[in-house]
Image (cartoon, rainbow, N blue to C red):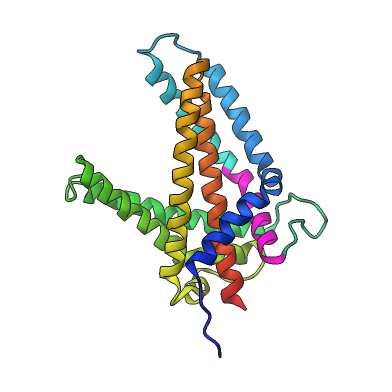
Amino acid sequence: MTAKILSVKDLISYALGNLFSRFGTLLTLCTPSLLVLVICAVMARLAVPPTGTDTGLEAELLSIIGYMSFGSLFATLALVPAFTGWHRLLITGNVRRENGRFFGWDIREWRYLGRLLAIWFCMMGVNIMTQFLAPLFMAGSVIGAVIMAVLVVSAYAFIWAKLGLAMPAAALGEQTGFIEAMELAKGHTAQLAQALISTWLILGILGGILVMALTALGAAIGSQYLVFVGVLLFYYLSLVASVGVLSRAYSVLRT
């Protein structure tokens, strides 16, 4: 039996290549989630009127972030069909469902959501652990903060590398659970984690440039909402890139 090999370079190029070459399809899939965020942004703006002073700007932004965080919960639910559709497109080449539609919700989306929440709770566990470890690494210093950030990102990548292959399986309606996913990823966890971290880093650099440009533009026109647009765009692209890495890995390892 020929050993299956995952190439970190192949995983990254596949995820990012499809992200940009199929951006139109991706935008269509994410439209419901984006609409939810737009509605929440409008509601936040109406609920938190502009202060008109620099001293009240911080409180204003924090209030808006609070409203947007609540709205992002509903936006994430709207993203689930987008993720299952993106998995389906990258693995089978067909983005539409059996009934010919782009969007829908059935047992596949429920399984996907359940596994997504399970992974999210694992990540929250990492966040809780960092609160206990922060004093040991002197998180208040620059070096300590960098060390903590590296540890957290590495832990996130490890969790997704170990459990993430259950996600494309759920999107395709297959029965592969976390135990089977860990068995499938056995011997390939390091490559998967490296590919995930690399895609996050690449998009983080691009996202940072975008946010700085939007910050400057927002200051010029007197609106900081453009900064939120940049942050949300980076958030979406990072999630979709992760889906691309996992889809490619699943395609290679399951055959």
As drawn, the residue found furthest toward the bottom would be: 1
How many marks the image carries: the answer is 0
As drawn, the residue found furthest toward the top would be: 52
Name which residue lies at 38% across and 14% down. Answer: 56
Could you tell me what secondary structure mostly forms the magenta stretch?
helix
Q: Nearer the viewer, residue 32 or 233?
A: 233
| Image quarter hosting the N terminus | bottom right
State which region is magenta: 76-92
Q: Position of residue 217 (x, y in %)?
A: 51, 23
Name which residue lies at 19% across and 50% down. Answer: 137
| Image quarter hosting the C terminus | bottom right
Quadrant in the rendering for residue 53: top left
Please indicate whether residue 95 sits to the left or right of residue 78 in the image.
right
Query: Where is 78 relative to 242, above or below?
Result: above
Q: Position of residue 223 (x, y in %)?
A: 51, 19
* Residue 69 appears anywhere in the view: no
79 is within the stretch colored magenta: yes
Name which residue lies at 25% across and 51% down. Answer: 147
Q: Nearer the viewer, residue 150 or 220?
A: 220
Please indicate whether residue 62 sits to the left or right of residue 170 in the image.
left
